[in-house]
Amino acid sequence: MKVLKFGGSLFDNARVILQRVRSSGADVLIVPGGGRFADLVRDIYRESGLSEEAAHWMAVLAMDAYAYYLSDISGIELTPLLVKKKGVRIVLPYEILRRQDELPHSWDVTSDTIAAWMAYRTGSKLIKATDVDGIILDGRLQETIEASKLRGMETCVDRALPEFLINHQMDALVLNGLKAPRLEDALEDKRPAGTLITGK
């Protein structure tokens, strides 16, 4: 099974991308990002003095909101369960994380690390689909990079993800979901253009 983190940046093209995922024949658990729903929580957090604890759970609920949107436009089944299963499903993270609250509650932990945790829990490969080609350093796409080199850096993955990958000896593939052949290759276990972050 693959765990596919589906970025909020893919919102405008989500219908077409999800059709391709659905027709791939792969077993995929889609983890929605927060996107514009989480951006609203960030704005409230900055403007109102909201605690990180409350903001964390509101942001996770924003992932649920995106999940409902993605399911509605694609017809893909929603699930509140973190189990391996045939076919394509979109996960509702809130109920799962309330039952298994193992991640820090801070803005360093976003849907990227939540998706990594779900991949770890299910023994699945992790793919992050976003609107950039991968990790860009000094203007160059990194085909492979060790997670340890990303500590403390601002990239297209959240700040907590590198440490999580190191601690759990996991890899993560980051690719541009707007370029359909790349996502299709990843779902078929081919190596597409993008960045493989290794858990070292």
Image (cartoon, grey):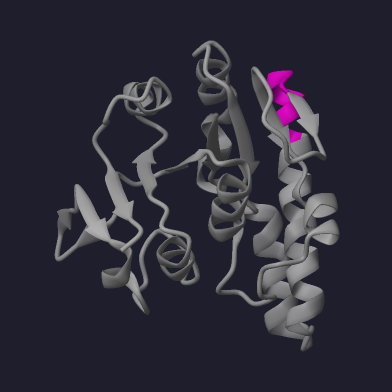
Q: Outermost residue toward the bottom?
A: 49
Up/down of 32 relative to 140, above or below: above
Left or right side of 174 for 80: right
- Comparing 118 with 67, the one in front is 118
Q: Which of the 4 quarters of the picture holds residue 153?
A: bottom left
Q: In this view, does 198 lie to the left or right of 114?
A: left
What kind of secondary structure does the magenta stretch mostly adopt?
Answer: helix
At horizontal 84% and vertical 60% (from top left) the residue drawn is 98
- Left or right: residue 130 versus residue 31 is left
The mark total stands at 0
Is residue 29 positioned above or below 94 on the image?
above
Q: Position of residue 9 (x, y in %)?
A: 51, 46
Judging depth in this view, the residue of 5 and 164 nearest the camera is 164
Residue 198 image position (x, y, % from top left): 31, 55
Give left or right: position of 78 versus 5: right
- The one nearer the camera, 183 or 82, is 82
Q: Magenta residues, as a range?
A: 69-76
Residue depicted at 40% across the width and 65% down the height = 166
Is residue 7 rendered magenta in the image? Answer: no
**151 vs 96: above or below:** below
User: What residue appears at the point 57 percent right and 16 percent down from the top-left corner?
Assistant: 19
Rendering coords of residue 161 (x, y %): 47, 64
**In the rendered view of the protein, which quadrant contains the N terminus?**
top right
Could you tell me residue 20's position as x and y percent?
Answer: 50, 17
For residue 199, which quarter of the picture?
bottom left
Please give the name of the residue rendered at 57% of the width and 47% of the height, measured from the top-left corner: 8
- Looking at the picture, tell me which residue is in the foreground, 46 or 62: 62
Res 117 quadrant in image:
bottom right
Seen in the picture, residue 37 relative to 54 is either above or below; the reply is above
Query: Which quadrant is the C terminus positioned in?
Result: bottom left
